Image (cartoon, coloured by chain):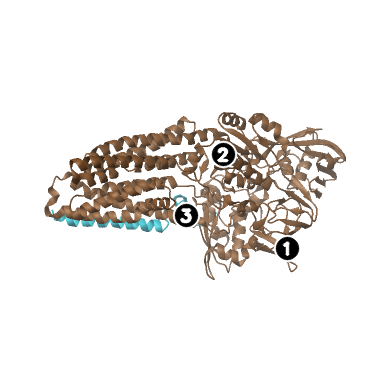
Amino acid sequence: MKNKTVCYHCGDECKELIVENDKNFCCNGCKQVYLLLNENNLCSYYDFDKNPGIKAMGKFTGKRFEYLEDESVLTKLALFRSDTQVNVNLALPQVHCASCVYLLEKLHQIEPGIIQSKVNFQQREVFISFNPQLISLRKVVELLAFIGYEPNISLKDNTKKSSRKTSKKQIIQLGVAGFCFSNIMMLSFPEYFSSGLIEEHGLKEVFTWLIFFLSLPVLFYSARGIFDPAFKGLRQKDINIDVPIALAIIITFARSYYEIITDTGAGYLDSGTGIIFFMLIGRWFQNKTYDALSFDRDYQSYFPLGVTVIRNGNEENIPLPKLEVDDIIITGNDEMIPADAVLVSGKANIDYSFVSGENSTQEKNPGDLLYAGGRQIGTGIKLRVIKKPSQSYITQLWNNTIFEKNKVSEDSFIHPWSRYFTLALFSIAAIAAAYWYVVDSSKVLPVITSVLIVACPCSLLLTSTFTFGNMLRIFGHNKLYLKNATVIESLSHIDTIVFDKTGTITRQEKSGISYVGIPLSGSEKVLVKYTAAQSSHTLSKTIKNYITDPASIERPEIEAFTEFPGKGIAASANGNKVQMGAATFISPGGKKTSAGNSEVHIKINDTYKGYFEVNNKYRDGISEMAASLSKQFKLHILSGDNDAERENLQRIFGKDTPIHFTVSPQEKLDYILKLQQNKANVLMVGDGLNDAGALMQANVGIAVSDNTSRFSPACDGIIDGNVVNRLSALIHYARSGRFIVSLGFTLSILYNFVGLSFAVQAKLSPVVAAILMPASSISLVAFAILASTIVARRKGVK
Amino acid sequence: MSALFILIGISIMVAGSSLAAFIWSVGNGQYDDDYTPSVRILFDDNNSNSEKN
């Protein structure tokens, strides 16, 4: 059995074989999905891509999605509602291939109640319209979840929609500018090259007035993308780069209109509209962001949307916001506690890893306070809510003022530069005007305006938008997805890096595990494996995944499985008794052997066998990354976990790196704040909800995600877990961005000198402007893109 | 030379109508997703054949 057998449905390695229709499946869930598809003639799903499925979770029998039957939820989610049709848009981050599209668009074959479903691959969304008389929204979502596409349902107001509307507006502005610019250019050529022929027949007049009218939509519609930020900056008393650009545009158009109306010239409308067109392209290029990723999730995305409460003796599932203080709620196995609550009854064994980063679970007794965000491991428990979800301990972090305002992005260095540039420009204009006042006073105004027209800081904006836009794309290729271009600049100023431990520098899912003790026989191994499989404790899961099935031995029937929360598990199978768990649980007075790692001791039929040692495994290449980063940055490590890993971490990150353990989410935030008060520019790299405050507070917060479709907290960037070790190269690349823009700026100053030399001599004819403008714009754009691509190669960033 | 007036009028009208078409197509959402349609075209319409491979 050398060849790995992979699941026909999901492509995972089959650890236990389930055969159906000559096809292998890794679990019953995958088989069920296959059978469902087969039954509905949808097996082309397996033709478009190899093993396209998503590991199935099994049918949903519970009340997990019951809250979707609530009227207020339905109203919020539905785009359109009538008696016979409901339209919803659901986010499905799992969509990844052609097969997904196929299956999701054929949903109507499985459920006749679904009228139509349409996938938007780039947004990872599906639009579904269904007949509410035949199928409920809950059933639709349950079906999606069953076939592996569990939607991300958010009841927050949809901000995505409005951003899409603005991006549509941007594209239309761009289109209008392009149309008008090209027509104006075409109509201007005869003026430049016909040497007076068009003066006849009034052709010239017609052309000039056509140009006049064509330029109006550019000035009043397209250019608003430049005027609006300029006015906004002025209102905040901040001269950003848009202010001098807006000024130059206004002067160009004003002088051109004056010339056309007084019939004294043709104006510079071709260059004016052209530069607006190019700048709009630059903006659009830079703002092309990763639609499918979300950078502004808050705690609500992590919490369940529905909770089971007991009201008037009945269990019902209500949407989370409707939860009131003193409600009695039921939290089942592996479910999250939605609000701070007191344990009423049941055995609570709470995994706070999500909140604190701590890896072990805590046992609680009735009467104890349980915090929201904890996950119950074991049987269901009854709780009495004492605080509303929005006022819980964990969510209070979000009441911190930093979450209210948008992160103040640092002032880009192009803004002060544009100020100096503008200042220099005004001085040149003043000197030229003074000179012409003496020589020929009629030329003062034309000279001032032509200086301001020809030397607009537009080229600076062009270089920076195209450079940063291209860099964003290159970062994306390297699986670092940044929120926007200003993050690149912030990233280049970083001097201190703070890492979270769990999930960031360690990999949570693949813990290093080894067995110490008397070797287990084949049947004992299977016994231990399937006993562990019964429990959802993280350690049990690790053990279950670690033991491979000996092919010859049949799977035992596990009976009398009991879980002792926080201690261990016991079961029997085929007359054999097995006990697994903490040392004290296996033998009274037993002691852990090693200080750092977690241990699971095994006793079979009352004979002690040995223990599994589980330790956190570090991501590949972390030590190399730490070595190269520590040369240039101050490194810090904050962990919510206990200090079991101190030695390992200190070895990897060096003796001088400050490492803090058992840090609460609030303390992480405060720690960053303290660093910043000491003038540090901090990059925070973290993953969980417990890092959310720190990610927000840091100058740059990057969330690590092993699966970009998974939730990540609010941040400035998302990095794929596999490339965390390349952080050093990526930061270096970010640093070179400024250098490239500076080079481009130098180049544009050379063009400006040429233009200005015409302008101060009062010789700036429209044809010179019309040649200089596109020549400089296009060459600068080419330079920006080429340079940022070449530098990326040099820095080892693909 | 007077033919130019007509020609320019026509040319602007042609260009203008393509601009109008562009604005309409953006508003209509035709640029929202430029990947899925390329996949969708591969799907068979007939639902009869169950197992092909």
Q: Against A63, is A225 above or below?
A: above
Chain label for disc 2: A
Chain label for disc 3: A
User: Mark 2 and 1 residues: CB-CB less than 8 Å, in contact?
Assistant: no
Judge by depth and name the residue closer to the eye, A445 or A258.
A445
Q: How far separated are the C-alphas under marks 2 and 3?
A: 29 Å
- Give the mark, 2 or 3, whose residue is nearer the N terminus: 3
- Give the mark, 2 or 1, whose residue is nearer the N terminus: 1
Q: Against A514, is A76 above or below?
A: below
Q: What is the number of the mark on residue A326?
A: 1
Q: Which residue is mark 2?
A: A682
Please report the residue visible at 58 percent of the width from the left and 64 percent of the height from the top. A74
- Callout 2 secondary element: strand
Q: How far separated are the C-alphas under marks 2 and 1?
A: 42 Å
Callout in the foreground (2, 1): 2
For badge 1, the amino acid type reads Asp
Q: Which residue is mark 3?
A: A163
Chain label for disc 1: A
- Callout 1 secondary element: loop
User: As drawn, is A633 to the left or to the right of A515?
Assistant: left
User: Mark 3 and 1 residues: CB-CB less than 8 Å, in contact?
Assistant: no
Asked whether residue A787 appears in the rendered view, the answer is yes
Which residue sits furthest front?
A438
Judge by depth and name the residue closer to the eye, B41 or A185.
A185
For badge 2, the amino acid type reads Val
Task: Tell me the colour chain A is drawn in.
Answer: brown
